[in-house]
Structures are given as C-alpha cells and as structure tokens.
Amino acid sequence: MSSVELDNVTKRFGSVDVIRGVDLTVAKGEFVALVGPSGCGKSTLLRMIAGLEDISGGTIRIGGRVVNELTPRERNIAMVFQNYALYPHMTVRENMSFSLMLRKQPESEIAKSVDIAAGILGLRSLLDRVPGQLSGGQRQRVAMGRAIVRNSEVFLFDEPLSNLDAQLRVQMRTEIKSLHRTLDNTMIYVTHDQIEAMTMADRIVVLRQGLIEQVGTPLELYDRPTNVFVAGFIGSPAINLLEGQTSVSEGKSVLILGDGVQVPLPGTVPSLGKGERVICGVRPEHVQFGAQGTEAVIDLIEPTGSDTQVHLKVGATRVVALSRARLGEKEGEIVKICFNPEGIHFFSSETGRRIDRSLLVP
C-alpha cells in the first residue's frame, strides 16, 4: 500500500477549469471517498490519479514517487469501473488472471493469486462461468477480484455500485468495506451517493466545481459542516435550512423568517447584532414535537418502518422532521415544534460559511 498526494492539481478542458488547484493527501491504508454533485470533477480527479487523464498542472505522487508522466501500468494502481469492464468471452478465472498473464507471471503464481482473491470474494464456485452467466453483484466482485490479484499499491473505484439495485448496493457496500479491512490497501472511492461515503469511508472529500469544500471523517462533516453547501449535501434526509433575521422577543432569542413567522432559538444566537440575517441549519432528527414551540402544519407523513419522516409547513417555510415514535397526528393537523439546541448550526447569509459557536453569545 502507498500514500497518494495531490499538490495544486489542475485540469483544464479548453477554456473550462474542471479541477482548480486541489491539495489532498491520502495516507497509506486509508479509505477516502470523493463526493459531490454531478460535474464537480470527482471522476476526472480519480482518472488523473490513475493516469487515464493528463493533468494540466500540479503534482501527483504515489508512494512518494512523482507519477505525472507515468502510464497507468507504471503507476501500479488497480481501478474498478462502473460498468465492470469484463471480457464477455472469458471465464471468471480468465478475467481475473488476464493482467498477470500479460506480465508473463508463472502459471502456478497466477493460479495461487486467483484462488486467494476468489476465496476472499466468494467466487470459487463461479470461476468457470462467463460474465453473461453472472448477476450484477457477482460481476462487480469479479471486477474487484481482477484488481486484487494485481497486488496494486492503490485501489481506485469509480462509482462501482451505481448500476446495482438498492438491496445489492447495501450488500456490496459491506463487502467492499470488509475487503478494505482484509487487504488494508489504500482505496479512493468516487460516488454520487453520500450514504455510501458515510458508511464506508475513513474520510470524505466534498467537491464542488473543481474545488474541495471540506475534508473530514463522516461524523465531522455531519456534525460540523464548514458551509451551507456541505451541510446540505451530507445527510439524508437533508438538513433544514431556515433563513431569517435574529432578534429577541420577550427576553428569548428568535429567528424571524421572511413571512414574519418567529421561530424560537434555544441556547445561543450569532453575535452579529440584532436583525442580522443568518441561515439556521437543523437536522431533521433535531426537530422535536412538544406542547410548546412554533406552530406547524403537517403536510405529509412518510413512514419508513423504523423512522417516520414528517413534512411540515412553518408559515411559508418547509421543514422536515425525523421521528422514531409512531405519530398519532394526521396530515393537515397543527402541531408545535422546537429545535434541539445542540443540533442547531448557524451560517452567514452573505458568505454561506459556518459561524463558529465560539462567536455565539447567550
């Protein structure tokens, strides 16, 4: 396994800057996920690390070695693609051993490497089948097995689960995470699904328009997003973002929404002066029902089994609550809601940046 270092890496297609000066270090044995909306540059960045895309500027190091001018084969990386990229006329055994055959390794070593990888991935009973006889999940395991046998320094995954159904995606998430624990290899994983990133990665890199917005552990990004974009992108259901002016009513802090509705703010409010516009972020699980608080109308109830998502209207503002309890209320009824003070985030309306709690006053 090797570290991967990106130093001011850029990529330009014509006059369009796709990657705009990315600095990132992935430690040996670390599992890092690259996430962001479509077009943010995450797949392009992965392909640049792999050597499948030339870089326009900066430096890429793998294991401390500058690889800017090296071919993908010379970089000793393994890549797992979204479409599996298996040879349809070859058996599973042949697909997994093909790269080793090109290297002219002894047949005994090839057979041993394939057997080890097949054992790890539960493929031994499928070695004589061709890809057309396999399910989507089995094909993806073969693609991973082909990467394992190469004994590469770094594994790169480009949205490998996007073609699978929901149940298979959950299963394969577990298998890839288990694979990382078994191999202890450095892995960089691109996904548009932030749930995949949250459940699998040691650290997550959030990209937007070719720039890194935030890097951190899944819980760091969830509990302390650096700006409104990260707060809105990480978490499902998405965070509630309420914009308004801070004020004091009857000795208590409130947020006055655009239509004049006052939402109590327990605890602390930004020390930016009375009437300052802020964005208040509240995760759905921190929206609580009770006898006191702000009146809200239940617009929609979505039971999901263990949880219930409740869509509410606070004046003209929509708020989503996530409740573990079975609700007796019905759609159209009026309830009262309040916010858990520990679950409130404040962001500047002007910049979108987080307002640190050290800058908050009672």
Image (spheres, rainbow, N blue to C red):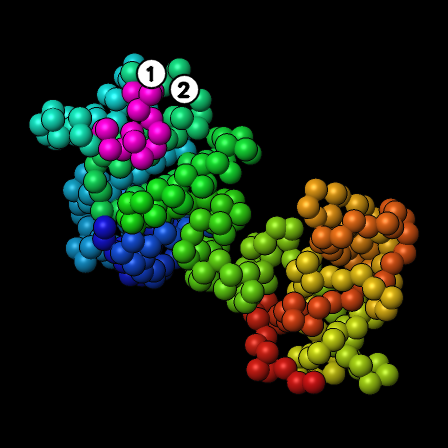
Q: Position of residue 40 (x, y in %)?
A: 47, 49
User: Amino acid type of disc 1?
Assistant: Val
Q: CA distance from mark 1 to mark 2?
A: 7 Å
User: Amino acid type of disc 2?
Assistant: Leu
Q: Quadrant of residue 111?
A: top left
In the rendered structure, the answer to whether residue 116 lies left or right of residue 203 reads left
Q: Identify which residue is drawn at 34% across, 46% down.
A: 180
Residue 302 vertical position relative to residue 100 in the rendered view, above or below:
below
* Disc 2: which residue: 134
Element type at marker 1? loop
Q: Is residue 362 magenta?
A: no
Name the quarter where the C terminus is drawn. Answer: bottom right
Q: Is residue 121 magenta?
A: yes
Q: Are marks 1 and 2 in contact (CB under 8 Å)?
A: yes
* Disc 1: which residue: 130
Main SS type for the magenta part? helix
Q: Position of residue 144 (x, y in %)?
A: 33, 34
- Count of numbered tags: 2
Q: Position of residue 102 (x, y in %)?
A: 14, 27
In the rendered structure, the answer to whether residue 333 lies left or right of residue 107 reads right
Magenta region, residue range: 114-127
Residue 149 vertical position relative to residue 88 in the rendered view, above or below:
below
